């Protein structure tokens, strides 16, 4: 029978609950168990798709086209298990389902209430489709004590009774602050936070304590005593220099064996963590360094580019180099063209995904700089669209080339996608329709041209990549652009949607309509990122 581990957080936010959950999943996997990870988010948005990256960081896309919380990205990067729509539920989604049922009359005249209707819907979201897994790890977003997360905590409390204590476990992540004046790690915030949990009827069986130093025995015993857990179940989550060291660090602290002991499973010996040791070793002791400029728009909050930063790091692992990222606001270049000179001594330039007109001209300037100065270039989604506009303006003699995303234009190089195929189904959209959930989003196949650079990078011509876009490169301009030397080297299988463009005469210049960063793993770097960083290494050497 499936076992459920619920992970809550207390004291403060941003303790890295997502990474901690993912690292535990990786450890259970290394012990030979089949794991699935889920996240419950307490906000009222139905999904994070409509939230600004500044609010919520990156929106992570699943194969089945869900727009989800960025923690699902960590889950995939640590476990390699592809997340699904069902793995992320928000308060908004739960309520909209319950209200839809109420409108249909499914509740047969009952008064619809948080308990039991909302909590039942939460419980259903937690357990549905989990039969084949040994462990399901469920992270609860937010901090214990918030009003918003109460229905989720109540659902967990009930689930522990429904499924049995021997099949459910609660892990609570807290912070042990070090107070220099006292020379001590303080346990009081942890005690209070566990009290908050106990108030709603949940007794954690394990505490994962973020701390910048080892927990002395005395403090460990104190925490165990006051919080009603075994001292062995007080696990130090020590600060690490790379997130990929977490599985190794938690294992040393005994986390996985304590979890297995709790469930009455064999817990001796150590799992094979060589995969993580290799990754950490390469990150800590690379043989060189490359500098990559990321010219974007949300650079003030790096969580907006979480998967991208990780994928670039993975590209570095593949080439045994450190990748130093320089985050540049593209609007800088619009203020003064001289600032483009900053790009002269980087080894590669990347223009990532984005939305809206602000900063677009600066991105186009960065594309031109990369093209003219033979600097390796990767354009992702919006970045690819800007590369095509740059080509049209600078090389194809279409100075008014633009995207209809920025308003009406005579030369719609990039236009609103109004219909596209998903398998045998045609999906359609109206201009001015709803914004939420109306993009071409999720994994779609693409065909790469034989002999193209991108096909060489992948080592195959049939690919499947995750998308999230509302506009598309206008295929009617294909001939005009190809005459300038830009090759359309990847297309949707029906030949209608441009997926990849490249300049065969440039050392390495590729634009892709999809988001390769979402599929990269530290133990399996995405070929586009390995290839891009390899090109940067070659540029650095030349
Ligand atoms: N704004 C562009 C579109 O919707 C690009 C989206 C993106 O970069 N993810 O097509």
Image (spheres, helix red, strand yellow):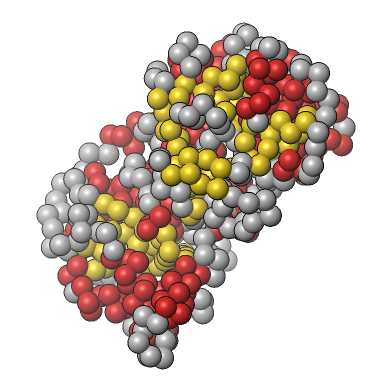
| Residue 59 visible here | yes
Residue drawn 76% across and 43% down?
Answer: 406
Image position of 487 with respect to 513: above or below: above
Task: Check the picture and name the quadrant holding the C terminus.
Answer: top right
Residue drawn 27% across and 59% down?
Answer: 129
User: Could you say where residue 233 lies in the image, as x and y percent from the top left?
Assistant: 28, 64
| 128 sits to left or right of 83 | left
User: Could you say where residue 2 lies in the image, as x and y percent from the top left?
Assistant: 20, 61
- Foreground residue among 326 and 235: 326
User: Could you say where residue 159 lies in the image, as x and y percent from the top left?
Assistant: 27, 75
Image position of 145 with respect to 365: above or below: below
Write down the quadrant of residue 140 in the picture. bottom left
- Foreground residue among 120 and 461: 461
| 482 sits to left or right of 254 | right
**Number of numbered discs:** 0
- Foreground residue among 145 and 340: 340
User: Could you say where residue 364 lies in the image, as x and y percent from the top left?
Assistant: 75, 30
| 378 sits to left or right of 88 | right
| 381 sits to left or right of 278 | right
Residue drawn 72% across and 21% down?
Answer: 391
Task: Check the picture and name the quadrant holding the N terminus.
Answer: bottom left
| Residue 530 visible here | no
Residue drawn 56% across and 62% down?
Answer: 180
Write down the quadrant of residue 377 in the picture. top right
């Amino acid at each position: 029978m499936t076992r459920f581990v619920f992970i809550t957080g207390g004291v403060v936010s941003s303790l890295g609950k997502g990474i901690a959950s993912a690292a535990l999943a990786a450890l259970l996997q290394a012990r030979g168990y089949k794991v699935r990870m889920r996240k419950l988010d307490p906000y009222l948005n139905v999904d994070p798709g409509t939230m600004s990256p500044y609010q919520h960081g990156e929106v992570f896309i699943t194969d089945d086209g869900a727009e989800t919380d960025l923690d699902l990205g960590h889950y995939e990067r640590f476990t390699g298990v592809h997340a699904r729509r069902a793995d992320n539920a928000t308060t908004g989604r739960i309520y909209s389902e319950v209200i839809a049922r109420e409108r249909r009359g499914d509740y047969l005249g009952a008064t619809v209430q948080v308990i039991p209707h909302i909590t039942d819907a939460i419980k259903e979201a937690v357990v549905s489709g989990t039969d084949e897994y040994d462990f399901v790890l469920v992270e609860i977003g937010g901090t214990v004590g918030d009003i918003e997360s109460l229905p989720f905590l109540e659902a967990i409390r009930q689930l522990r009774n429904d499924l049995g204590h021997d099949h459910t476990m609660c892990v609570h992540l807290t912070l042990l602050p070090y107070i220099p004046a006292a020379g001590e790690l303080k346990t009081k915030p942890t005690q209070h936070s566990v009290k908050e949990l106990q108030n709603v009827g949940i007794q954690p069986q394990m505490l994962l304590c973020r701390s910048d130093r080892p927990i002395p025995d005395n403090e460990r015993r104190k925490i165990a005593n006051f919080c009603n857990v075994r001292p062995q179940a007080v696990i130090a989550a020590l600060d690490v220099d790379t997130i990929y060291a977490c599985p190794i660090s938690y294992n040393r602290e005994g986390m996985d064996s304590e979890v297995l002991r709790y469930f009455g499973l064999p817990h001796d010996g150590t799992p094979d963590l060589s995969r993580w040791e290799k990754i950490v070793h390469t990150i800590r002791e690379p043989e060189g360094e490359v500098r990559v400029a990321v010219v974007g728009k949300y650079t003030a909050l790096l969580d907006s580019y979480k998967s991208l930063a990780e994928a670039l790091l993975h590209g570095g692992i593949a080439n045994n180099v450190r990748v130093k990222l320089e985050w540049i606001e593209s609007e800088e270049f619009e203020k003064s063209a001289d600032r483009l000179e900053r790009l002269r001594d980087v080894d590669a330039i990347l223009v990532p995904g984005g939305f809206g007109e602000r900063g677009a001209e600066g991105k186009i300037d960065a594309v031109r700089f990369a093209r003219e100065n033979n600097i390796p270039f990767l354009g992702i989604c919006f970045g690819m669209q800007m590369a095509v506009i740059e080509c049209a303006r600078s090389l194809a003699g279409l100075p008014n080339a633009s995207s209809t995303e920025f308003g009406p234009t005579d030369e719609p190089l990039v236009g609103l996608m109004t219909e596209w195929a998903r398998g045998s189904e045609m999906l359609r959209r109206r201009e001015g329709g709803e914004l939420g959930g109306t993009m071409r989003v999720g994994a779609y196949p693409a065909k790469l041209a034989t002999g193209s650079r991108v096909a060489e990078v992948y080592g195959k011509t049939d690919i499947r990549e995750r998308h999230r876009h509302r506009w598309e490169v206008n295929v009617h301009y294909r001939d005009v652009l190809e005459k300038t030397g830009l090759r359309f080297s990847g297309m949707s299988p029906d030949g209608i949607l441009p997926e990849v463009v490249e300049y065969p005469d440039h050392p390495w210049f590729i634009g892709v309509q999809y988001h390769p960063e979402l599929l990269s793993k530290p133990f399996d770097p995405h070929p586009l990122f390995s290839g891009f960083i390899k090109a940067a290494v070659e540029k650095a050497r030349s």
